[in-house]
């Protein structure tokens, strides 16, 4: 049985460089620093952290690692088409097109990959997740973890302003969205206390910033 480190190394050698380059090419003409190729790479880093933590109690397999990496590298590419909150469907189309045009063999769980890409932007979390060791929850939570901390402050501010949200409304809307993300993270991964407690602190950094901003904007 391969170790989680070996699985990740194998998957990265197969996919990471070419998918990252493709993602980067999409954002050259579409300047969205908060959600560009560097965001996709950070999301993959958080996904790896989640996978390592899960592997302590649930054995991770190659298919999950491969599918998660692909989903991470495509999930926000749809923002190059639309800045709408619900951009996952466009990201899914870009992923499908990439595999078709490059005549690539699709992983066995490709449909699960596409579903995760399409649904990752549902921050009301209407999909009930029974298996925390599957692509959608890993992708969603890795994406959410990049909204925490000081980087999260910058990311929220940029994308909300690009979507036309009024400056005075921004802190309240961010806090609402941020709390939904953290609540979902807790429901999914509170059984992994090391992971949970580390990112709880990062969530609080972002929340405190916008709490202070809210006081000043009233």
Image (cartoon, rainbow, N blue to C red):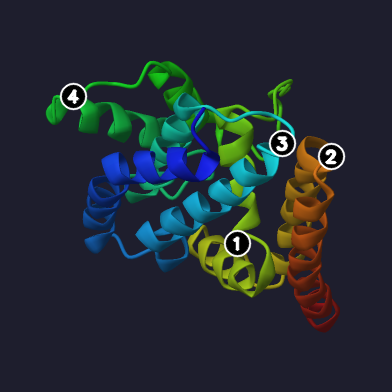
Camera-side mark, 3 or 2: 2
Residue 25, image x, y percentages: 21, 55
Sooner in the amino-acid sequence: mark 4 or mark 2: 4
Q: Measure how far apart labels 4 and 2 are at the Cα level.
A: 39 Å
Disc ID at residue 124? 3
| 149 left or right of 212 in image | left
Say which residue label 4 marks. 100
Kindly identify the residue that appears in the image at 73 percent across and 48 percent down: 181
| 16 left or right of 5 in image | left
Q: Secondary structure at mark 4?
A: helix
Kindly identify the residue that appears in the image at 76 percent across and 76 percent down: 209
> In the displayed structure, would residue 154 be above or below residue 89?
below
Say which residue label 1 marks. 165
* Depth order, front residue of 192/89: 192
Residue 23, image x, y percentages: 29, 51
Disc ID at residue 191? 2
> In the displayed structure, would residue 14 be above or below residue 212?
above
Question: Is label 1 in contact with label 3 (beta carbons under 8 Å)?
Answer: no
Question: Which residue is most to the bottom?
Answer: 216
Sooner in the amino-acid sequence: mark 4 or mark 1: 4
Question: Is label 4 in contact with label 1 (beta carbons under 8 Å)?
Answer: no
Sooner in the amino-acid sequence: mark 3 or mark 2: 3
């Amino acid at each position: 049985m391969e170790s989680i480190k070996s699985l990740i190394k194998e998957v990265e050698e197969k996919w990471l460089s070419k998918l990252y380059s493709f993602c980067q090419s999409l954002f050259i003409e579409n300047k969205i620093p908060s959600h560009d190729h560097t965001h996709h790479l950070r999301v993959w880093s958080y996904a790896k952290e989640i996978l390592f933590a899960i592997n302590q109690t649930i054995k991770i397999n190659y298919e999950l690692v491969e599918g998660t990496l692909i989903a991470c590298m495509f999930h926000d590419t749809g923002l190059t088409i639309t800045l709408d909150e619900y951009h996952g469907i466009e990201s899914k189309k870009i992923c499908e097109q990439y595999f078709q045009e490059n005549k690539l063999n699709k992983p066995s769980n490709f449909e699960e990959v596409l579903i995760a890409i399409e649904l990752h932007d549902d921050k009301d979390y209407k999909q009930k997740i029974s298996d925390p060791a599957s692509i959608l929850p890993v992708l969603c939570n890795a994406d959410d973890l990049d909204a925490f901390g000081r980087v999260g402050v910058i990311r929220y501010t940029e994308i909300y302003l690009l979507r036309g949200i009024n400056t005075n409304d921004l802190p309240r809307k961010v806090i609402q969205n941020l709390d939904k993300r953290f609540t979902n993270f807790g429901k999914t991964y509170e059984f992994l206390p090391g992971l949970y407690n580390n990112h709880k602190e990062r969530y609080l950094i972002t929340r405190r910033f916008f709490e202070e901003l809210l006081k000043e904007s009233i």
